[in-house]
């Protein structure tokens, strides 16, 4: 899956974060380093998901119900995915609420002022 596909799956309610995962803790420097690695085409880690019809409690406002069928949970990579989502979408992903975001990395870059 590429970044666009991952973000679309978050938007479409196909990727969730289990409540047992740690909160979003990355700081601006972590986000800068992630984008630096992406630009330089360095490895940025993998994403590990778990597809299940019996998920544990989920983060955010979503409550699982049987009509949802099998859902994918992000087990590894949620700091990176959350960072990419906030920067590229300009909003908090649906599996979080604003109070869960201690370090907002949206608006990471400062607009250049032209003379």
Image: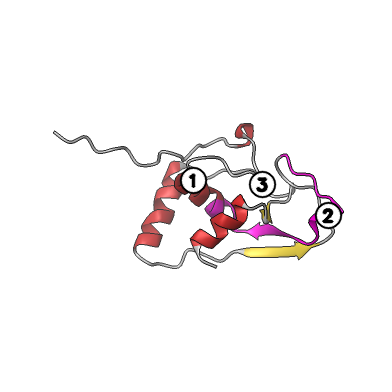
Find the distance from the CA under tag 2 to the CA under tag 3: 27 Å
Find the distance from the CA under tag 2 to the CA under tag 1: 28 Å
- Which percent across, then down, holds residue 12? 63, 53
| Quarter residue 1 falls in | bottom right
- Residue mark closest to the camera, 3 vs 1: 1
Residue placed at 52% from the left, 45% from the top?
26
Q: Name which of mark 3 and mark 1 comes first in the sequence.
A: 3
- Label 1 packing within 10 angstroms: few (<14), some (14-19), many (20+): few
Q: Is residue 74 magenta?
A: yes
- Label 3 packing within 10 angstroms: few (<14), some (14-19), many (20+): few
- Which percent across, then down, holds residue 101? 58, 37
- Left or right of 48: which side holds 108? left
| Quarter residue 28 falls in | top left
Residue placed at 24% from the left, 38% from the top?
112
Find the distance from the CA under tag 3 to the CA under tag 1: 22 Å
Image disc number at residue 44: none
Residue placed at 38% from the left, 67% from the top?
41
Q: Name which of mark 2 and mark 1 comes first in the sequence.
A: 2
- Left or right of 113: which side holds 53? right
Residue that numbered label 2 is attached to:
67
Residue that numbered label 3 is attached to:
22
Q: Quadrant of the C terminus?
A: top left
Q: Is residue 79 magenta?
A: yes
- Left or right of 58: which side holds 2? left
- Residue mark closest to the camera, 2 vs 1: 2
Residue placed at 78% from the left, 62% from the top?
70
Q: Which residues are magenta?
A: 61-81
Secondary structure under tag 2 reads helix
Residue that numbered label 1 is attached to:
89
């Amino acid at each position: 899956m590429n970044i666009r596909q991952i973000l679309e799956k978050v938007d479409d309610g196909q990727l969730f974060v289990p409540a047992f995962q740690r909160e979003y803790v990355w700081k601006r420097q972590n986000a800068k380093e992630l984008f630096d690695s992406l630009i330089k085409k360095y490895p940025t880690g993998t994403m590990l998901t778990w597809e299940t019809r019996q998920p544990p409690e989920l983060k955010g406002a979503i409550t699982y119900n049987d009509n949802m069928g099998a859902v994918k949970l992000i087990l590894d990579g949620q700091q990176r995915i959350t960072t990419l989502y906030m920067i590229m979408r300009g909003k908090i992903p649906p599996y979080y609420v604003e109070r869960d975001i201690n370090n907002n990395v949206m608006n990471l870059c400062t607009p250049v002022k032209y003379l």
